[in-house]
Image: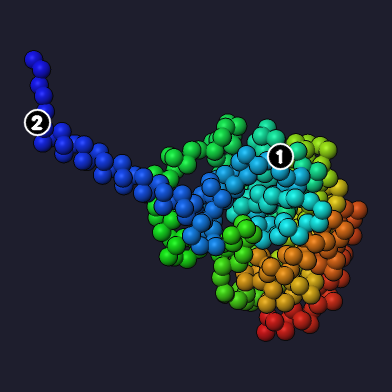
Amino acid sequence: MHTSFPATTMRYLAMLASVTALCVGMAFASNALVDPLWYFGGNQLKPINFAFNERLSKANLIDGHEADYDCIIFGDSRTTLLPEQKIQGRRCFNFSFSAGAVNEFLAYAKWLKSRGLNPRLVIVGVSAGDFRQRNPPHNIPNFILENRNPPSPFLKYLSTDVVAMSWRTLFGSSPIDRFYNASFQCQIAVASHYDPTKPIRDQRVGPFDNRAPLAQYRALRDVFPNAEFIGYAPPISAYAILDYQKIGWLPSYTGALVGAAGVFDHFWDASIPSPVTIDPANTYDGTHYSSTVNARIAEGLLSGPEPYAINLKHMTADEAITAYLVRLAKYHDALIAHLN
């Protein structure tokens, strides 16, 4: 038996389908204009791009442009602030992201290589936190592990979660303490001031005695065997270094960096106490440093960013700890003055 719908019902269904399609289209269009996940070159309505998911967003940003770069930068949130445009003579893409770890850099490097990236220079911001005794993070997206394209924007930009991201981008504040400008250069988003009398986050979660990550740093180098491989330790508060010295962790800290230095062609340690790291005004939390500091480091990575850093490449562990102790003694009075 054949059943037909009344004409009014058909008109209602057609109207409902049209309204639904219009709403879906408007949601996609608005999300595409704000582009919170950086599929289409970022926000077209305001000169800011919030970092909701750097691991996905940066993959979207470089997708299809891998061959345009001859330099890649990996690191954690501190390295996101390294201005890639200051690396002279190279076209760098800064693929650093919040809480980045070497096992993630290795996975992304393999993914990028398979897509045509062939850098002449690889820069890695080495975190001593990699050498603590803890399980590595498991934040690598499936499309990276499976060597696939990033997920389609036509799926991502129809979700209510992304609508909320777009709304916050236009009318709210950054979800983290950094944001990216219209040129995708990372900027500090907070106006707080660092208090050296308070420990920095995770300062005492353990010493730095785990050397297993060194194999992953070597594997990272092997992904791009023809590239120059430069490592650096981003600056951290001299007051944290003083604390490591007091509780007996400084040898494990410097030992971890010396071990890492052996993997690289050059390795600059900007975390040694210096006029930069004893001045609380240069950082808002003791680990993330100002644009001025990071620009000077970037400008000197190919030649040596002194006086911000020392060259650990040819230092022994004993020489490195001695250098740190000399610096702590040199700046002792200034350190104590800020702690009182």
Percent x, y of residue 153: 47, 42
Mark 1, other Cα within 10 Å: few <14 / some 14–19 / many ≥20: some
Q: CA distance from mark 2 to mark 1?
A: 59 Å
Find numbered disc 2 in the image and state the secondary structure of the residue it sits on. loop
Residue linked to disc 2:
6
| Left-right relation of 10 to 66 | left
Residue type pointed to by label 2: Pro
Find numbered disc 1 in the image and state the secondary structure of the residue it sits on. helix
Look at the image and tell me in which quarter the C terminus lies: bottom right
**Residue at 80% across, 71% down:** 274
**Residue at 59% across, 44% down:** 59
In front: label 2 or label 1: 2
Q: Earlier in the sequence, mark 2 or mark 1?
A: 2
Residue linked to disc 1:
67
Percent x, y of residue 317: 86, 55
**Residue at 56% across, 35% down:** 149
Percent x, y of residue 273: 79, 70
